[in-house]
Image (tube, coloured by chain):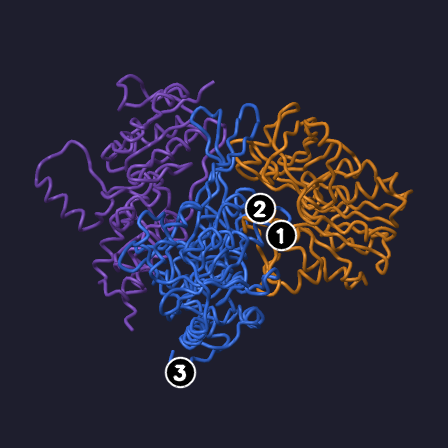
Amino acid sequence: MDNIYSLYKCRVLRVYDLTDDVKLFLFRFENPDIAESWTFIPGQFVQLDIPGLGEVPISICSSPMRKGFFELCIKKIGRVTDKIHELKPGDFVGVRGPYGNGFPITEFEDNDLLLIAAGIGMAPLRSVFMYALDNRWKFGNITVINSAKFGKTLLFKKELEAMRDMAEAENIRIIQTVTRDPDWPGRVGRAQEHIKYANTKPEDAYVCVCGPPQIYNDVFQTLIKNSYDPRRIYVTLERRMKCGVGKCGHCIAGSSTFLKYICVDGPVFGYYDIISTPGLI
Amino acid sequence: MRYVKITNEKIYDFLERLKNYGKLYAPVKISDKFYDRKEIEDVREIAFEYIRTLMPAKKYFVSPTEKMFEIDIEKGEYKETLENIEPFVIFGMHACEIVGLRILDGVYLDKYPDIYYKRKRDAGIIVGLSCLPDEYCFCNLTRTDFVDVGFDLFLHELPDGYLVRVGSPNGHKIVDENTDLFEEVDKNDIDAFRAFEEKRQEMFKWEGSFDNMRYILELTMEDEVWDEEVEKCFGCGNCTNTCPTCRCYDVQDIPDIDGKKAKRIRFWDSCQFRGHGLVAGGHNFRGTKRDRFLNRYICKNAYFYGLGTSYCVGCGNCTYFCPANIDYLKNLMKIRSMTEVKNG
Amino acid sequence: MSLKIGVHGLTSCYGCQLKMASVKEIINIARNFDIKYWYMISSKGEIEHVDIAFVEGSVTTKEDERELKIIRENADILVAVGSCAIHGGVQGILFGEEYEKAFKEVYGDKKIEYEAEISHPIKNFVEVDYNLPGCPPEEDEIIYYLATFALGSYPEEKDYPVCSECRRNGYPCVLIEKNDCCLGPLTVAGCNARCLKYGISCIGCRGALEEIAWFDSLAKTFKEKNMGEEYVKSRMEIFGKQYEKMEEMLKKVFENED
């Protein structure tokens, strides 16, 4: 029997600075068989391990269409991620996964797609976005709303900015907005204030939201006011999983009628799950 | 189901023979008030009268502390540490704990089977033992007072011995290999078994059903009735550690002094501890004592689809072993009344 | 390149240093770390810049305070070691009039060279990065702290109570069984319930769990077990005098007569 907690060696291929405290890492599994066969659904996460320090759950932010490689966007925020930030190309880490349900991506097909990110929320949503770009013909109009407090803390700012004009021709709209940066030359205001500028048809769109817990209510309300279908709104949640496979209990959330392990039953939940379950966000 | 009988004269022989099937663990008295399971040398020290043990039988399957990996930090290599597990027999598990173990099975042997648990589960033989409830027991409410599966043998007390239910191929094997110890069940035994079960049912203190508890609980989580109980709680985690179905664990890497090797260990954790709901960056999803206190009630009263019961098996351990005298069942009764049986 | 460390003692019994010096792996500590200052094991050395300074003992004199500040200035990381450094230790039990009285009893009218003060935890004077609790600290934790530093990281401090380790070891609960005044529920784990192993109730030598030590809840239970306020207070004060929360919480329980 396989040990579900076994880690596979991954080599760091590239490291990019996204912001002062967020880096993007490109990995490849050392074992070529695993590298070729390993795949995932956007919205899933891996357990990333620094030997001797421990594991952290990190959502995958690349497209599953890029076989053999995957990217993780990691904020320096604790004991393990501090160390991850010291990694250089050529270094090794341990990885296991993918875990979680991921976004119902096949259900999204043939529809418009609205992605709303706040703070570091773009990390898991970028995987959905990249997947949609790789399969452009499968999706209708796409809008990405990426928001942060300051221009310098906008994740993937340059990447999204670089594709903005070209994307418009492909019916992809990229909106980047900041809330507290007077020097920012672009759009300002919270993510939800820009929903009205999306190119997605509300009756025909799926919505993915990711950000700090306090943004959800306002985003939901604006979406619904703008006629988006609540049944088609999904969010992805964060917890500190120790196992990733529904054992250790750290990510258990919800109430007595809807008790969920975020790591296996989530991290992606629908709008109605969220509003009917205290403790999820 | 196959039924056989063993008489009181032969019970110690039987226990002695169980050692042929593995290390024998059974309840013994460890102090004035407490029992716990220990490895048995002398079968006569087994405490048949025990009601609950300080550590639930889960300790044999989910170790309080266990090593998972040895890590070579420099090479980035992980070697799983699968300790040598010898066959063992747990004697005297009550119905509630057997259901508890099946709940753990549902969690640990799901689509991501946990090898450390599986190996111990495969090595363990379960011999159940009937019991009479004390004031803390409410397995009749949670419908976990009788088990159909989850044991190899189950002994039901009779005036002159035990009626034995055979619940698995391993159970059959034990009976077949020791036919000299067993005899046929006769009509008197059946009458005695029935009488015992009736007496047992009458001894439960409360009657009612837990079926809609989870809805009522969900609707009353903001109620003030919880405040006083939260105030009493130390957050010591005794309730979860003594619960047969609590299974949260934490993982820690312990590096060697030279920083070249490390071991990865896991150990029982508790949702009653502050660190349980903490995420990177300092946000805590269960930031207050109230959050943590209620989390246990929520989790225990949630529905385990695998068995069609709640995660709570009605053993009463959490109340019995609470140093702050917090009464789990009484607290639930505050939000959803139960009827006290007259002679209870 | 090995980390430079220093081990220092302020006012204390020097038991923590002794423990550190007598761990089984002391040779490996010496091999893997560059010990710049450790008076107990070598009279050589002066306070110089180190990566990590371990400080045991509390501040009870101006001299302690001055030395502590020099240690802090010369250390990237400062670890408070043991009960005295972290929360003032047993000597921290004396405050105000009690202190004056005790001082008189011990020294009378004699003139002493230094100015003695009430015992303070070192965090009252300098920034402390990590706490290594215990009286003295446990061997495995000493190694764990050093090893995580050696890895370029830092230790995870325990934030759960001794009860947890007591249950994991299957020791009978003395609070339930013997109605003992056990402080396990308040006290930082890590000792593997050392005293409970022998049925001796916890006196809280590792210090209370900051923020989540429910002195009031525990005191209420003690009160229900017919323990008096003075007794409960005297037990909790042995290592807990420095917790402001304690007085307030005890007052709430004992003054609120039903």
Q: Is residue B225 left or right of residue B49?
A: right
On the image, the x and y values in percent for residue B62 come to 48, 47
**Residue at coordinates 33% horizontally, 38% vertically from top-left?**
C122
**Residue pushed farthest front?**
B180
Instruction: Specify the colour of chain B.
Output: blue
Q: SS of the residue at dot 2?
A: loop
**Residue at coordinates 42% horizontally, 33% vertically from top-left?**
C144
Q: Which residue is mark 3?
A: B342
Q: Residues within 10 Å of mark 1 (few under 14, many from 20)?
A: many
- The correct choice, above or below, for B34 with respect to A47 in the image is below
On the image, the x and y values in percent for residue A7 come to 61, 34
- Quadrant of the image containing the N terminus of chain B: bottom right
On the image, the x and y values in percent for residue A12 come to 66, 27
Which mark is in front, 3 or 1?
A: 3
Q: Residues within 10 Å of mark 3 (few under 14, many from 20)?
A: few
Q: Amino acid at mark 2?
A: Met
Q: Which residue is mark 2?
A: A241
- The correct choice, above or below, for B165 with respect to A156 in the image is below
Q: Counting residues from the N terminus, which is met first, the one under dot 2 or under dot 1?
A: 2
Callout 2 touching callout 3 (CB < 8 Å) = no
Q: Which residue is mark 1?
A: A262
Instruction: Specify the colour of chain C.
Output: purple
Q: Nearer the viewer, residue C36 or C223?
A: C223
On the image, the x and y values in percent for residue C234 come to 22, 54
